[in-house]
Image (cartoon, rainbow, N blue to C red):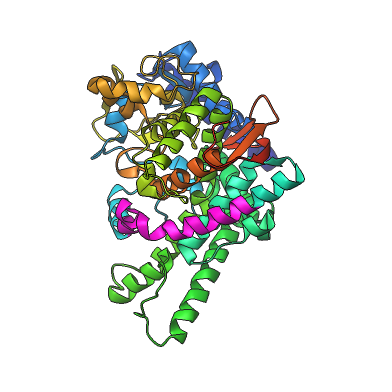
C-alpha cells in the first residue's frame, strides 16, 4: 500500500506541472504571440536550439516568419524593434537581467557580467570604469604593439613554409596574450607556442557551453555546479580553473609587490590592470576589495579573449570575401602613410582618423557580432509597452544583436557587406541615429561591455597593419561557427604571403 502511495507522488507532481503549464498557455494575456508550437509549454525547444550551437540564424529566421515578437519559451519572448531596444537596454533602464545569467557565475558568488542587482552592478562598474576608459587606452598600447610583433613573426613563419593555418585560432592566441599582458603584466605565451596552454582556451569554451545551457534551467545550477566541477571537461570545472588561475596571478603579483617593500612604487613601464587595482585597494580598502580583484581578472580572461578574437575573424573574413572593400582600405592606409598621418606601427589615434577603416570594422561587427543569443531581461513592476504590445511584470524579454543587425527595415540588403552604408548615413542624421540604436555588438546602456574600448584598441591596431603587410587567402567558401553565447569561428583556414609595404599590387 505504501509503495503505491510513494509511486503516486511523482505522478501527481508531473500531473500538477502539466496542468499549470497548460493553464498558463491557455490563460496567458500573451497567448496569441506566435512562435514554434512547443514553446508554449516547455523550454526544451529553446534548450535544444542552444545545444545545436546555431541559434543566431534560427533567431533571425523566427522573426522573418513570425514578425517583431516571437515566443521562445513559456513567458519568454524575443523582440526585434528599435523602440523596444531603447526601452529595455537604454540608459536608466529598470529591466534587470533574467535568471539565465545565474549560470554565468559560481552559485555562491556574484560577478560584474552576471549580476542581476541593478544597484550593485552600477556601484561595481564605477570601481572599474577608469581602467577600461578611452583615456586609459594610450597606456595599454605598448602591450598591444608587443603582441602584434610576435603575431606577425608567426605569420612570417607560415608564409615562409607556405603552410595553411586557422586564423581564428591565432586571433585568439593574440587576444589572450594581449589581455594577459594588460591585466597581469605578463603574456600567457599562446603566441609563442600556438597551442592551448594549460587548457585555458578549452576551459573558457566549456564555461560558455555550460553557462548558456544551464541558464535555461537556472534552478539546476546550484545542484549541478559542485559535482560537475569534479569533471575536468565540464564548464563548471572550467570556471573553477579560471578562478584558480586568476587567484594564482594575483598571489604572484602580491608577492612581487611585497618584495619591493613599497606598495606605491612607480614602475617605469606601462602599468597593468592588476597593479592599478592593487594600488587603489591599498589606498581605499573599503571601496576596492580582494574580491574585486578576482572578479575583474575573471571577467578579462573569460570574455576578453573570445570577443576580440571573434570580432577580428569577422572583420578579416568579410574583407577577404569582398576584394573591393579590401582594396579601398589598403588605398586609405597608403594615402595616410604618404601624407605622414600613418606611422609604421599605426597608433590608435591614427586609426580613429581613417573613415573607411572605421566603417569596415563597424559593418563587420554588424554582420558578425561576437554575441549571438538574446540578452534576456525581466519586465519590471507595472509592466511595459514594447513593440505595440503590453508585457506584464515578470515577463522575460530579449533582443539578439544578430536579429537587430539583420533587420531589413534598418539595414537594407542586410546580408551584404557594405561599409559604405555607414559613411553614406552620415549625411542623414535620423537614419544614422536609427542604425546606431539598432547596433549593439557590445551591448547597450548601463550593461555595455566593460572591455569594449580595449577590444576596439586591439582590432584598430592589428587590422590595418595586417591588410597592409600581408596577403591572406581563405581556403573555404564558408566560415563555420559555434554559438554558445559567443559566435565562434571553427574553421577559418587561410594561407598567407608577405606584401611589399605600401603596394596595392
Residue 284 visible to the viewer? yes
Relative side of 177 to 263, left or right: right
Residue 203 visible to the viewer? no
Residue at image coords 62%, 36%: 471
Check the picture and name the quadrant holding the C terminus.
Answer: top right
Give percent across and percent down for residue 366: 44, 29
Residue at image coords 27%, 51%: 119
Judging depth in this view, the residue of 256 and 267 nearest the camera is: 267
Q: Is residue 213 magenta?
A: no
Residue lying farthest front? 338
Relative side of 485 to 440, left or right: right
The segment highlighted magenta reads 128-153
Q: Quadrant of residue 375?
A: top left
Relative side of 111 to 187, left or right: left
**Residue 374 against residue 136 in the figure, above or below:** above
Residue at image coords 50%, 18%: 415
Q: Quadrant of residue 130?
A: bottom left
**Residue 503 against residue 300 in the figure, above or below:** above
Number of numbered labels in the structure image: 0
Amino acid at each position: 500500500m505504501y509503495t503505491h502511495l510513494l509511486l503516486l507522488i511523482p505522478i501527481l507532481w508531473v500531473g500538477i506541472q502539466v496542468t499549470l503549464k497548460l493553464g498558463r498557455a491557455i490563460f496567458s494575456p500573451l497567448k496569441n504571440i506566435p512562435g514554434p508550437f512547443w514553446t508554449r509549454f516547455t523550454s526544451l525547444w529553446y534548450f535544444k536550439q542552444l545545444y545545436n550551437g546555431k541559434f543566431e540564424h534560427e533567431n533571425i529566421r523566427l522573426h522573418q516568419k513570425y514578425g517583431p515578437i516571437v515566443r521562445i519559451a513559456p513567458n519568454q519572448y524575443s523582440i526585434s524593434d528599435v523602440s523596444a531596444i531603447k526601452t529595455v537596454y537604454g540608459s536608466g533602464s529598470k529591466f534587470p537581467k533574467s535568471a539565465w545569467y545565474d549560470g554565468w557565475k559560481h552559485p555562491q558568488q556574484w560577478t560584474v557580467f552576471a549580476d542581476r542587482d541593478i544597484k550593485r552592478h552600477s556601484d561595481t562598474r564605477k570601481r572599474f570604469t577608469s581602467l577600461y576608459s578611452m583615456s586609459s587606452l594610450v597606456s595599454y598600447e605598448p602591450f598591444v604593439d608587443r603582441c602584434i610583433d610576435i603575431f606577425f613573426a608567426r605569420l612570417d613563419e607560415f608564409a615562409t613554409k607556405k603552410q595553411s593555418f586557422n586564423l581564428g585560432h591565432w586571433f585568439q592566441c593574440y587576444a589572450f596574450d594581449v589581455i594577459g599582458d594588460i591585466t597581469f603584466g605578463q603574456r600567457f605565451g599562446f603566441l609563442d607556442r600556438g597551442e592551448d596552454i594549460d587548457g585555458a582556451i578549452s576551459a573558457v569554451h566549456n564555461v560558455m557551453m555550460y553557462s548558456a545551457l544551464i541558464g535555461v534551467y537556472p534552478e539546476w545550477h546550484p545542484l549541478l555546479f559542485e559535482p560537475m566541477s569534479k569533471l575536468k571537461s565540464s564548464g563548471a570545472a572550467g570556471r573553477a580553473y579560471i578562478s584558480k588561475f586568476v587567484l594564482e596571478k594575483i598571489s604572484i603579483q602580491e608577492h612581487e609587490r611585497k618584495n619591493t617593500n613599497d606598495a606605491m612604487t612607480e614602475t617605469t613601464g606601462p602599468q597593468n590592470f592588476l597593479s592599478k587595482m592593487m594600488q587603489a585597494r591599498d589606498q581605499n580598502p573599503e571601496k576596492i576589495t580582494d574580491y574585486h580583484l578576482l572578479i575583474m581578472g575573471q571577467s578579462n580572461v573569460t570574455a576578453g579573449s573570445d570577443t576580440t578574437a571573434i570580432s577580428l575573424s569577422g572583420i578579416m573574413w568579410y574583407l577577404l570575401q569582398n576584394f573591393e572593400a579590401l582594396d579601398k582600405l589598403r588605398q586609405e592606409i597608403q594615402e595616410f602613410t604618404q601624407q605622414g598621418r600613418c606611422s609604421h606601427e599605426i597608433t590608435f589615434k591614427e586609426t580613429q582618423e581613417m573613415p573607411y577603416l572605421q566603417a569596415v570594422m563597424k559593418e563587420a561587427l554588424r554582420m558578425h557580432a561576437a554575441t549571438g543569443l538574446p540578452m534576456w531581461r525581466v519586465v519590471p513592476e507595472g509592466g511595459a509597452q514594447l513593440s505595440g504590445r503590453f508585457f506584464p511584470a515578470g515577463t522575460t524579454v530579449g533582443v539578439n544583436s544578430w536579429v537587430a543587425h539583420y533587420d531589413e527595415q534598418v539595414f537594407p540588403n542586410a546580408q551584404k557587406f557594405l561599409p559604405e552604408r555607414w559613411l553614406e548615413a552620415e549625411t542623414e542624421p535620423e537614419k544614422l541615429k536609427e542604425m546606431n540604436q539598432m547596433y549593439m555588438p557590445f551591448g547597450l546602456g548601463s550593461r555595455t561591455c566593460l572591455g569594449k574600448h580595449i577590444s576596439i584598441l586591439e582590432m584598430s591596431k592589428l587590422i590595418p597593419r595586417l591588410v597592409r603587410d600581408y596577403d591572406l587567402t581563405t581556403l573555404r567558401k564558408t566560415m563555420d561557427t559555434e554559438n554558445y553565447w559567443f559566435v565562434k569561428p571553427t574553421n577559418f583556414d587561410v594561407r598567407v604571403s608577405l606584401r611589399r609595404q605600401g603596394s596595392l599590387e
